[in-house]
Amino acid sequence: MLMSYLAVFLILLLPSSSSASTLFENKFKECFINQLDGISESIEKIIFTTSSSLYTPVLESLEQNPRWLNSSRNPLLILTPFHESEIQAGIRCSKELGLQLKVRSGGHDYEGLSYLSKTPFVMVDLINIRSIQVNLADETAWVQAGASLGELYYKISKESKVHGFPAGTCPSIGIGGHISGGGQGTMMRKHGLAADHVVDAYLIDANGKIHDRKSMGEDVFWAIRGGCATSYGVILAWKIRLVRVPALVTVFNVERTLEEGANNLIHRWQHIAPELHEDLFIRVVAQNSGDKSKTFKAVFNSVFLGGIDRLMPLMNESFSELGLQAKDCIEMNWIQSVMFIAGYNKDDPLELLLDRTTTFKSSFKAKSDYVKEPIPESGLEGAWKMVAEEDTLAMLILEPYAHVYSK
């Protein structure tokens, strides 16, 4: 049976919560130092307890959702290792003291899984484990788990004009968690998910032992690429396969209000988006104004792997209802399209991709789901009414996958 899949994300802002205190600090530090022959950095640069003046700045440095801060369920201490041996020591000491261990590689973490627990835990923040080595000879790269998507995209663009990587749209997302959850992005209809392009990985298990693909086994290697790697250990690095990108890509943002037929367009989009040419990605960001005006708009946000001359015939044939015109489109190279989809301008400096600070920080709730059948127009109308009536920012982000076959 042939089915079309669309990913739908609901985001609703909520009020914030509280922070926590720490236990076992001295025991953990003593254990940690004993596990190592020597520490390359001062212990104060690696372990941050709740009594440290830097604990809160470190905890807040990468978070996107302040809802998870100021909670009694935050980590007892934060570990920011510089070397794999310090991760190994953190794993062994947490195990010895009966503490949970949670990993943060970026900070988006919509549900706060790295930030909260009902049982005492240690957060391992991989901010210092972030090297990237690109090998154009075999079109691969080794990326440490603490690197961000923006850092990876930037590094690839400096090494090659014809290579890219199919991953997410937010530059501040950490590689470790992104790939271990699958990793969708604007090139997924042509190249699949980020996890589909992992060819090897380094994983530190619960005993502190480091594994590559061969020693962890194919079952675990399969599981960590989409099944949450922290269920099996701490990802140290991914080896990824790069993809070829054209010299020219085209982007557009087309806004439509309900009065301009947004509901009918979104209903039509559901039917055609998974069937479009694999080079063409169009998602919909449907949102209110974030205030009490009760207004609503839908933005058709697109990246096409080719020029305007190829794009326009495809759009006129498949989605003429949108009324796209050549003047709505901008041609650029692939790395500029990464900037565009992240909300930057075409000619902004690429170094902005290196900024790990999330541009949007406000307490929110997000929910993801998969839609196998198009939502009827009446259902869409009800959704937009709910979105528009919110006094704070609320949105639906609809992502087109492609046809898959099921027996």
Image: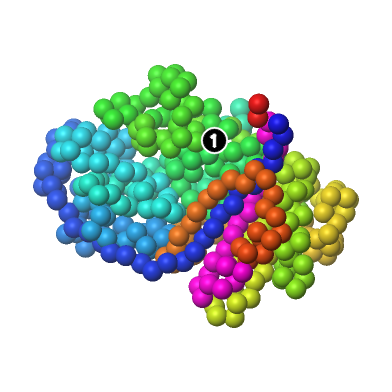
| Residue that carries the numbered disc 1 in the rendered image | 195
Residue at the spot 38% in from the left edge and 42% down from the top edge: 129
On the picture, is 62 further left or further right than 47?
right
Q: Identify which residue, 13 or 60, lies in the foreground.
A: 13
**Residue 10 point in image, percent of width and height:** 54, 58
On the picture, is 338 further left or further right than 318?
left
Q: Identify which residue, 19 or 138, lies in the foreground.
A: 19
On the picture, is 126 further left or further right than 340?
left
Q: Identify which residue, 136 or 259, lies in the foreground.
A: 259
**Residue 18 point in image, percent of width and height:** 28, 64
Residue at the spot 75% in from the left edge and 48% down from the top edge: 271
Q: Which residues are magenta?
A: 385-405
Amino acid type at mark 1:
Ala
Residue 184: name its quadrant: top right
Whether residue 105 appears in this view of the structure is yes
| Quarter containing the C terminus | top right
